């Protein structure tokens, strides 16, 4: 089953997800990310990048069709070894995250669009800032939470491929592909005809 925990981690410099099935758009590539959890860091393999449209509940007070919404996340890294899915600081580029709970106790905070309209909210009964998804049949069937009971530390995802002078993860990945292509072209240039035939 899919991991249904989508945890906001403002210290993470990228989004990350465990399951390929979440990604509606997908570009395979290989890199390494670092994930800090419970005071220890671990290197994890990145297998690709893509975009996700999360089926979310927009407002804890809305019912029926009015409660249904979609939160689109782009440049999401596919990292199967993650303990849970991570919504990192890039969401702050086009959304506002309010980590103050509602007076009625129905949410732990909310995610607002540029117009200040609520597009998603955090579960009130979760120790983390976990996004409330739509359940079946609108949303997918998800498995039990993989986070340990009583755990308080939020996973922090960091990918060094996101440099300070690069505006997006996708641009960084395109640069990596271009570097590989240039190396391949140089190899062809310096090879003789027989060697080129062997490559092809």
Image (cartoon, rainbow, N blue to C red):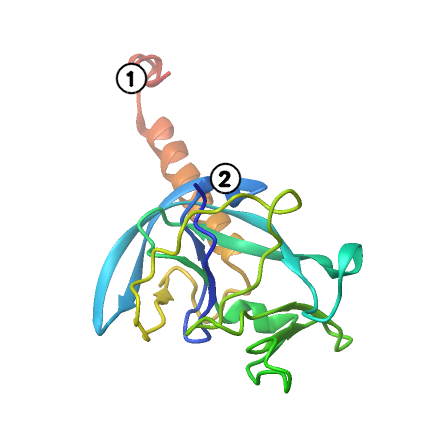
Tell me what residue is drawn at x 50 percent, y 65 percent: 166
Nearest the viewer among 6 and 184 is 6
Nearest the viewer among 49 and 61 is 61
Residue 44: image tag: none
Q: Quadrant of the C terminus?
A: top left
Q: Give neighbour class at mark 1: few <14, some 14-19, many 20+ (Cα, 10 Å).
A: few
* Outermost residue toward the left in this view: 40
Q: Which residue is mark 2?
A: 21
Instruction: Decide which of tag 1 and tag 2 comes sooner along the chain.
Output: 2
Tell me what residue is drawn at x 37 percent, y 65 percent: 157
Task: Tell me the element at label 2.
Answer: helix
Residue 90 spot, x, y in % from top left:
54, 68
Q: Give neighbour class at mark 2: few <14, some 14-19, many 20+ (Cα, 10 Å).
A: few
Residue 38 spot, x, y in % from top left:
24, 72
Q: Is residue 180 above or below residue 109?
A: above
Tell me how far mark 1 sits from mark 2, CA to CA: 41 Å
Please indicate whether residue 100 sits to the left or right of residue 144 in the image.
right
Q: Which residue is mark 1?
A: 195
Residue 103 spot, x, y in % from top left:
63, 87
Tell me what residue is drawn at x 30 percent, y 72 percent: 150
Q: Across the whole image, how many numbered discs are drawn on residues?
A: 2
The image quarter containing residue 151 is: bottom left
Tell me what residue is drawn at x 31 percent, y 19 percent: 192
The image quarter containing residue 73 is: bottom right
Q: Quadrant of the N terminus?
A: top left
């Amino acid at each position: 089953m899919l991991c249904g925990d989508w945890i906001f981690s403002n210290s993470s410099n990228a989004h990350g997800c465990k399951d390929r099935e979440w990604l509606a758009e997908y570009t395979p590539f290989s890199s390494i990310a670092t994930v800090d959890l419970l005071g220890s860091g671990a290197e994890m393999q990145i297998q690709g990048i893509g975009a996700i449209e999360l089926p979310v509940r927009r407002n804890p007070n809305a019912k029926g069709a009015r409660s249904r919404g979609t939160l689109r996340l782009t440049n999401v890294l596919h990292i199967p070894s993650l303990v849970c899915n991570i919504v990192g600081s890039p969401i702050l580029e086009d959304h506002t995250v309010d980590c103050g709970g509602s007076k009625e106790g129905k949410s732990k905070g909310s995610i607002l669009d540029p117009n200040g309209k609520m597009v998603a909210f955090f579960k009130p009964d979760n120790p983390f800032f976990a996004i409330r998804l739509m359940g079946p049949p609108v949303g997918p069937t998800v498995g039990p939470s993989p986070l340990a009971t009583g755990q308080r530390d939020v996973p922090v995802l960091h990918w060094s491929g996101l440099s300070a002078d690069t505006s997006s993860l996708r641009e960084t990945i395109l640069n990596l592909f271009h570097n590989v292509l240039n190396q391949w072209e140089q190899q062809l240039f310096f090879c003789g005809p027989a060697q080129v035939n062997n490559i092809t």
